[in-house]
Image (cartoon, grey):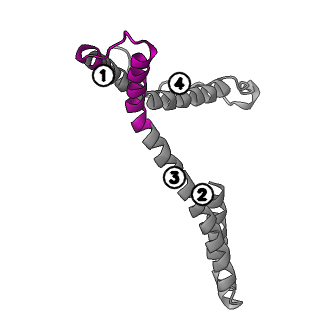
């Protein structure tokens, strides 16, 4: 965001002073500045995309690896533990049942974070000092001729 903000600020300066920029032929200088900031911004975006791809890959592979490791540990811990079809399919079905709530975990964390921020903002608003009653003008409005009285429609 920092790079994007600085690029937008520079572009606003360029657009606001375009006449002066053209008059003194400063286009190449400003072009280099904008390209430098944009390059930094693109590097940061690329790094973020790589991290997102890696985390998605890990998130997708984790259920398979957990199942594989669990069944491998079950078999290797004791010689009496034999992995037959019944135990394997029951284990696989239980892991698949657990996969659905775990896939909802990031949404839950995001929702809780947003709720926390919203509650803090509401709390800050409600904890603000009241308006000074002397600063508010209050006047009563008497009913006019076009006002409906109770029972009229």
Of badges 4 and 2, nearer the viewer stands 2
Q: Secondary structure at mark 1?
A: helix
Q: Secondary structure at mark 2?
A: helix
Q: Say whether marks 2 and 3 touch (CB < 8 Å).
A: no
Mark 3 → mark 1, Cα distance in angstroms? 31 Å
Q: Which residue is mark 1?
A: 92
Q: Which residue is mark 4?
A: 142
Sequence-wise, the earlier of marks 1 and 4 is 1
Q: Which residue is mark 2?
A: 44
Position of residue 47 relative to residue 24, above or below, is above
Position of residue 39 relative to residue 69, above or below, is below
Which region shows up in magenta? 59-88
Residue 72 covered by magenta stretch: yes
Q: Secondary structure at mark 4?
A: loop
Image quadrant of residue 24? Answer: bottom right
Of badges 1 and 4, nearer the viewer stands 1
Across and down, in percent, residue 127 comes to 69, 23
| Residue at the farthest top position | 80
Mark 2 → mark 3, Cα distance in angstroms? 10 Å
Residue 84 covered by magenta stretch: yes
Kindly tell me whether residue 47 is visible in this rendering.
yes
Which mark is on residue 50? Answer: 3
Q: Say whether marks 3 and 1 touch (CB < 8 Å).
A: no
Question: Which class describes the residues within 10 Å of circle 3: few (<14), some (14-19), or many (20+)?
Answer: few
């Amino acid at each position: 965001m920092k790079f994007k903000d600085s690029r937008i600020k520079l572009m606003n300066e360029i657009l606001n002073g375009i006449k002066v920029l053209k008059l003194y032929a400063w286009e190449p200088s400003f072009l280099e500045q904008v390209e430098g900031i944009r390059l930094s911004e693109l590097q940061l975006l690329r790094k973020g995309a790589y991290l997102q791809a890696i985390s998605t890959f890990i998130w997708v592979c984790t259920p398979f690896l957990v199942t594989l490791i669990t069944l491998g540990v079950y078999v290797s811990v004791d010689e009496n533990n034999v992995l037959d079809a019944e135990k394997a399919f029951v284990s696989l079905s239980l892991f698949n049942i657990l996969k659905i709530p775990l896939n909802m975990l990031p949404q839950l964390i995001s929702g809780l974070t947003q709720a926390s921020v919203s509650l803090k903002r509401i709390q800050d608003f409600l904890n603000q000092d009241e308006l000074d009653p002397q600063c508010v003008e209050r006047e009563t409005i008497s009913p006019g001729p076009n006002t409906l009285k109770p029972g009229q429609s």
